[in-house]
Image (cartoon, rainbow, N blue to C red):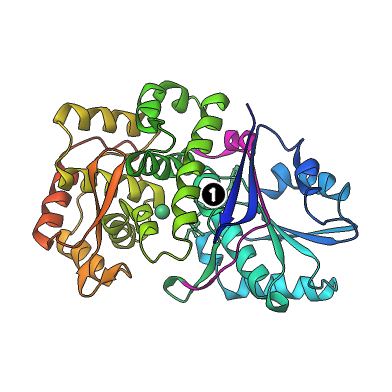
Amino acid sequence: MPRKLDVSCDGVYAYSIYIERSFDKLPEALRTLPVSGRRVLIVTDTNVAPLYLDEVKEHCKTCFEYVDSLVLTPGEEHKNTDSISEIYERLILDGFDRNDYLLALGGGVTGDMTGFAAATYMRGIAFIQVPTTLLAQVDSSIGGKTGVDFRAYKNMVGAFHMPKLVYSCIGTLASLDKAQYASGMGEVIKHSMIKVINGVDYYHYLLTHKKELEARDPDVLEETVYYSNLIKRDVVERDPKEHGERKILNFGHTLGHAIEKCSHFSYTHGQCVAFGCLGALHLSHITTEEENNEIRSLMESVGLDTKLKEMNASEILAATRKDKKMDHGHVSFILLHDIGQAYIDTHVTDQDMASALQYLMQTGKILNNEA
Ligand SMILES: NC(=O)c1ccc[n+]([C@@H]2O[C@H](COP(=O)([O-])OP(=O)(O)OC[C@H]3O[C@@H](n4cnc5c(N)ncnc54)[C@H](O)[C@@H]3O)[C@@H](O)[C@H]2O)c1
Ligand SMILES: [Zn+2]
């Protein structure tokens, strides 16, 4: 069943999220916006363009007066101000003005950069998110955080800029490689652990559908993207600029970011979040060993390692202190009172984190040896 969700900002309607199997409903969704007589620049990358650009372009042509596309080089190493310059240059050459649109077709890298270009070109133009990775559909396309990396500093330059529309096509998830699919599932599993929305037991939904998730069953993926979006929407609506509750979305991220950095990004982001979730769960003391095995089995089914390779724990601990989530000298660490009930804790010590890391290096399975 296709799904639509409306997102508000400061109590006022901001944009809708469409979750569809195909791109067929894209024109209908676009026409809910003032697109007639306007121009759009579709920004994508060289992996996504051969798969989906033509189709999306054709749909855009039925709505906009003029459609152009810009195909960038993929990868986090290109999420920088040089790529933003390429976008500005094309917008200027095409004569785009404040009434025109940018459309991001791709993963979180494309979405973050296109959103940032939209936030800053002529002091802000409209942008549309068409996320094509699981991570982008469940996480980065929602909430209005945009930005780029600056030198070695990740997401150091950015702006809050809400999209006008998010159109998630579940069909695009079929072409994701195993590692990218697993990475998105790391964030999905995180969502299921932090909050219960509308009484839905999302966490048990995932546990009981692990075979379908392994097979990328579209019905189950549609429900999964929808539940994750419900949770992220609820959290960002209450705290759009991350002054308080939005921090719970960082569950699994204190250890996760530090592992990601110390592994020199050889693990994907979502894989590191999955490790971080297992570590935080260990420190929350709320699950039995049998329950921990169930969680690990779900992670392994979708291609996530549950055992961390041998790494230098003190280096990882040092990296947690450099993480920007420090609060008055304490690392603010998200723990769980129960599955679906996250809270912000500032009492987790280095010793606690060291024991969680040791646990991660001793328990579970390594599926992907190249990391
Ligand atoms: N703004 C936010 O709130 C937020 C939240 C989380 C993450 N992020 C950012 O998102 C980025 C990570 O996003 P990501 O995991 O989507 O990575 P990504 O954008 O690098 O995409 C991963 C790879 O998959 C390819 N790809 C995309 N869609 C595909 C498809 N359907 N089929 C085949 N290949 C496809 C891409 O070309 C790329 O090579 C990071 O830069 C991170 O900082 C932002
Ligand atoms: Zn994340």
Residue 268 visible in the displayed image = no
Q: Position of residue 128 (x, y in %)?
A: 69, 55
Q: Nearer the viewer, residue 243 or 76?
A: 243
Q: In percent of the image, x 12 and y 61: which residue is there? A: 349
Q: Is residue 21 above or below residue 343?
A: above
Residue 135 visible in the displayed image = yes
Res 316 quadrant in image = bottom left
- Horizontally, residue 323 falls left or right of residue 282, namely right
In magenta segment, residue 105 = no
Q: Nearer the viewer, residue 49 or 237?
A: 237
What is the magenta range? 156-177
Q: Is residue 204 above or below residue 280?
A: above
Residue identifier under label 1: 136
Q: Quadrant of the N terminus?
A: top right
In magenta segment, residue 159 = yes
Res 248 quadrant in image = bottom left
Circle 1 Cα neighbour tier, 10 Å, few/some/many (<14 / 14–19 / ≥20)? many
Q: Is residue 96 above or below residue 206?
A: below
- Horizontally, residue 265 falls left or right of residue 67, namely left
Q: Is mark 1 within 8 Å of ligand 1?
A: yes
Q: Position of residue 143 (x, y in %)?
A: 53, 57
Q: Nearer the viewer, residue 115 or 315?
A: 115
Q: Position of residue 79 (x, y in %)?
A: 55, 66
- Horizontally, residue 58 falls left or right of residue 190, namely right
Dot 1 amino acid type = Ala
Q: In percent of the image, x 65 and y 75: which residue is there? A: 120
Q: In percent of the image, x 11 and y 55: which residue is there? A: 352
Q: In percent of the image, x 64 and y 58: which residue is there? A: 163
